[in-house]
Structures are given as C-alpha cells and as structure tokens.
Image (cartoon, rainbow, N blue to C red):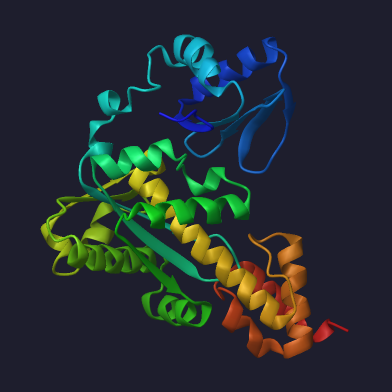
Amino acid sequence: MPPLHSQTVPLSPDQAEKLRVILKDRGFSFEEKPYMLYAARQEKLNIAVYEKGPKAVLQGKGLEDFITFVLEPEILGEARLGYEEVHSPEQFEPHFGIDESGKGDLFGPLVIAGVYLDGDLARHLRDSGIQDSKAISSDKKIRDLAAVIRKSGAPSEIIVIKPEKYNQLYRSIGNLNRLLAWGHARVIENLCARVPKCPRALSDKFADSRVLQKALLENGKKIQLDQRTKAESDYAVAAASILAREGFIDWLDKSGKELGVTLAKGVSPKVKSAASTLIAEYGADILPKVAKMHFKTAAEVLGTADEIP
C-alpha cells in the first residue's frame, strides 16, 4: 500500500475535545478556520477538526505514526488504520454513494453526483487518497482526485442543476430538501441503469428518509436506500462529493470568466459584492442566471440594486 497522505476520522464531541488537549500538550500550534472547531499544525502534520460530525482530517508527514501511536490508543481506543474492512465492511461491498455540492452557495448550480464502488474499486480509491471534498480546500486537489476517480473506471453519474433551472424547480417544489431528494433520485435511477445489480445506495441524511424514498423512480425503489450522518466517511460517498465539487467549481470558473466577474463561493461579503457588481454591469435580470434566488443574500442585493453607482 502506498504511504498515507490523508485520513478522515469521525469523532464524538468528547473525543474532539480530548484531542485538542493532547495536541496542546504536544506543542501543536493552533489557528481558527471557518467550519472548524480548531486546526492544529506541527512541522508538516496538519490536523483539522470540523464542527460537522465532528470529524478530524489529518494530512501530511508523520500521519501514520500519529494515528498509530497517539490517535488510536489515546482517543479512539482501538486500531482502525489498515482495519477499515474489519470495522466498516459495508464500504467494500457493492453500493452507490451519492452526494451534492453548491447547496450552501449563492452563486452556481446545485450539483449531485453518484459513484458505484465494489471492493476492488473502494480499495483503489482509499489508497489513492479519496476523502470527503469538504475537507479539501484546494480546487486543484479536487480536480486531481476527480481525475483519479474517472481513471479508476468507477461508474459515475453527475447532474448539474444550473441556477435558472434550480430557481424554476425551487419555485415549483418549494423546499430545498425535496429538491435535493428529486436530484438524488435521478442520480440513483441513472446509476441503476448502468449497474442494474447494485443492491444498495448510501447518502448523507439531509431530511426525513421518507422524503427521498418518495422521490425514487422505478429502478431506485427496488434497491436498499440508506441515509446516515457522516456518510462522507464512506469511500463511494466521498468520491461522489469530489465529482460534485468539481462540477460546481468548474461552472463557477467558466461562468465567472464569461461575465468578467469572480463568482466566489459561499455567502460572504465578497459574494454580495460580486452580485452587486453583476447587477450594476448587466442589470437585475442577470442574478437568476447565476444565483439561487431564495437565498436571503439575493434579496438583500436586489433591494439595494438601484443604489449601486
């Protein structure tokens, strides 16, 4: 197996706090970052503990030794590194993983992706460093890992719901969770057509499971559907999250270049400023073509559009 460069580990809140104390005692330097409980660094080893989960993402030199001699005995209380097939055998059984990108961003599409993995494909992607896209801050890294997934031959499906279509669907459906379920159901249906004998699909839990179950189409209704929190620790879901993220950032880059304005991620003041610039240059009609109109930020920008110099 090639050397490990990155590892994502689910933690309980108590484990996350205990890890913070241990890192402090060992002389790690800390910094605050968005969506993280904390981020710590020592030499070339970086440890980020995310609020969602929580979960720890470990990257860099000395990773395997830290997991084996500190994280597993002192925090987890069990050996997991190299034992994924013992602790999570379902990750290596045939299944689809589904995830999305863009739902929390004003600009850009909602992209939903699905990936089919069996044991050999799961091991290959594990050894290639596939992890949840939310733990990857570099667009280049997202694209590099997406290329690894495509090269692996793992069957995949991607649906890009562009802003104009998204806004139309949102007006019709009236609820983000139902819209997500609509997209997830179509990805599952497309994957079922490609891999008819796949027995199961897994996605992150974003609503009552009945919402997605109700949205499933003919083939999707025939397979087992699982939803759980921290589903992105599954290699198929992690792979889907990377393909979805790539589709999202590619759309932002292409559309931003065409318009001559950088379409930033999220809903930050920078995003609001870019939206105001677009309206000043192209008029208010441009916004539904690049943004999700049910966002509060969209209403705020449109409310001040006539004051833009």
For this rendering, which residue is in front, 211 or 231? 231
Residue 91 occupies quadrant: top left
In the image, 126: left or right of 61?
A: left
Work out whether 284 lies above or below 109: below
Q: Is residue 43 visible?
A: yes
| Quadrant where the image shows the N terminus | top left
Name of the residue lying farthest toward the right: 309
Residue drawn at point x = 72 percent, y = 79 percent: 303
Residue 195 in the figure: left or right of residue 74: left
At a point 41% along the width and 78% down the height, the residue shown is 169
Percent of width and height locating residue 234:
35, 40
Q: Is residue 127 above or below residue 164?
A: above
123 vs 45: above or below:
below
Is residue 230 at all visible to an observer of this figure? Answer: no
Left or right relative to 6: residue 182: left
User: In the figure, residue 266 lies in which quadrant?
Assistant: bottom right
Relative to 33, does residue 22 appear above or below in the rendering? Answer: above
Q: Residue 167, image x and y in percent?
A: 49, 79
**Nearer to the camera, 284 or 86:** 86
Quarter of the image for the C terminus: give it: bottom right
Q: Quadrant of residue 292?
A: bottom right
Residue 270: x and y, percent? 76, 63
